[in-house]
Image (spheres, rainbow, N blue to C red):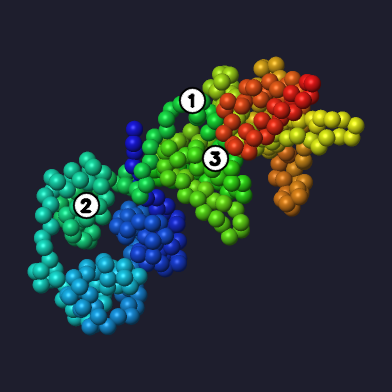
Amino acid sequence: MTAWNKINVPENKLRNLYINKGLSIFQISKRFGCTTGPIHRSLKEYKIPRRSLSEACTKVPISRKQLQKWYWKDKMSMFEIADKLKCTHSAIVHKFKKLSIKSRGHLGLTKPIRLSRRNFEYLYHKRKLSLNKIAKIVHCSESGIERRFNNYNIVTRGIKNRACKYKKCDFSGDLIEKAYLIGFRLGDLNVTKYVSVIQVRCSTTIPAQTRLIRNLFKPYTTPHIWKAKRGTTEIVCLVNRSFDFLLSKEDRIPDWILNNSKIFWAFFAGYADAEGCFYIHKIPKGKSVASAGFQVQTQQRRIINELWKGIKNNKIVAPMPIISRKAGAIDKRSVINNKDMWRLSINRKKSLNKLIGLIEPYLKHKNKIKKVNKIKENLILRDV
């Protein structure tokens, strides 16, 4: 089932940009990648006090002659002129009044909007179109459509059901995929709930990690990826509320995952792709083959102990998780541990071989898959 969600305009960000920083509605709309319409409506719904016309308008460096040419000879609309001058529609309206230039509407030259209330409600409520898209269909300005919208007293869809720029699809419902995503989220994703969308975010320097996250959410939304100044790659995916299951950040594995073997290994694979490490040691002196292993380190004490119990139930031998770094310790990156860091390791040849057999079908991280293949070759050499 396909779903459409609104362009997300959080109230706290809108207040900060409009009230504290004094940005215009046009400037805010450019930041959110939308038209001015959603910003106007969000200001109204959040009951944010609007600036007066004189306060809102910036100085527009244009002569009366040039303005008349664009408007009368070139037949540009006030919105098009505003876009050309990179200012707000209100600033152009104010400039027209200041220079005593009559608008085409005041002179009766603007074509009437031919759109009945019934058709308006069909486009807005049934087809879920934005006012901007409706304006393009009937070939008029968005402000004209907004006036007609108000004159018809059409009930707004509300902030929770507004159209957005990119199509979003509901989660598939597959439990294997769900368990993997929960494991990966608990290991490496930042998830935030907004009014009607869920923001999934990650920062990484590993290209394979970027590709993995993009592929995980590409069937459901349009991932946004960019390079940050600090050298990391930032990934943001806005998904709809069918992904509410990603919101929980509890230090525990849900019972429905622990009670099913296949689902448990899908979760383990997601957690391993995020936090795990498959490795091969250097060949020690006097030996022809190096040893290999798997480990996962995390501050989530309960999760790592539940993973240990899960592998024990599958007859995989591994020592109990231990504290690898205590709270307050400083690592190589000069980062201080807020909590104890716990480590689960699997090094025995038979246990490692069995772990790989159970987890490999669910791994998705290309780097981890390559390392697993090398470990499988290593295990064969150790049997020779």
Which quarter of the image is occupied by the N terminus?
top left
Give the vertical position of 29 relative to 302 (above or below).
Answer: below
Pointer 2: what residue? 134
At x 74%, y 20%, the residue is: 350
Q: Secondary structure at mark 3?
A: helix
- Alpha carbons under labels 1 and 3: distance apart: 19 Å
Q: Position of residue 69 (x, y in %)?
A: 21, 78
At x 25%, y 47%, the residue is: 129
Determine contact: label 1, label 3, CB under 8 Å.
no
Count of numbered circles on the image: 3
- Alpha carbons under labels 2 and 3: distance apart: 38 Å
Give the vertical position of 5 relative to 359 (above or below).
Answer: below
Q: Is residue 18 left or right of residue 122?
A: right
Q: Secondary structure at mark 1?
A: helix
Front residue of this view, candidates 381 and 77 = 381
Q: Which mark is on residue 175? A: 1
- Alpha carbons under labels 1 and 2: distance apart: 40 Å
Amino acid type for the residue under numbered disc 2: Ile
Q: Residues within 10 Å of mark 2 (few under 14, many from 20)?
A: some
Nearest to N terminus: mark 2 or mark 3: 2
Q: Which of pointers 1 and 3 indicates the residue nearer the eye?
A: 3
At x 67%, y 34%, the residue is: 371
Nearest to N terminus: mark 1 or mark 3: 1
Pointer 3: what residue? 212
Q: Which of pointers 2 and 3 indicates the residue nearer the eye?
A: 3
Q: Position of residue 87 (x, y in %)?
A: 34, 70
Q: Secondary structure at mark 2?
A: helix
Q: Is residue 307 left or right of residue 171?
A: right
Nearest to N terminus: mark 1 or mark 2: 2
In the rendered image, which quarter is residue 280 located in?
top right
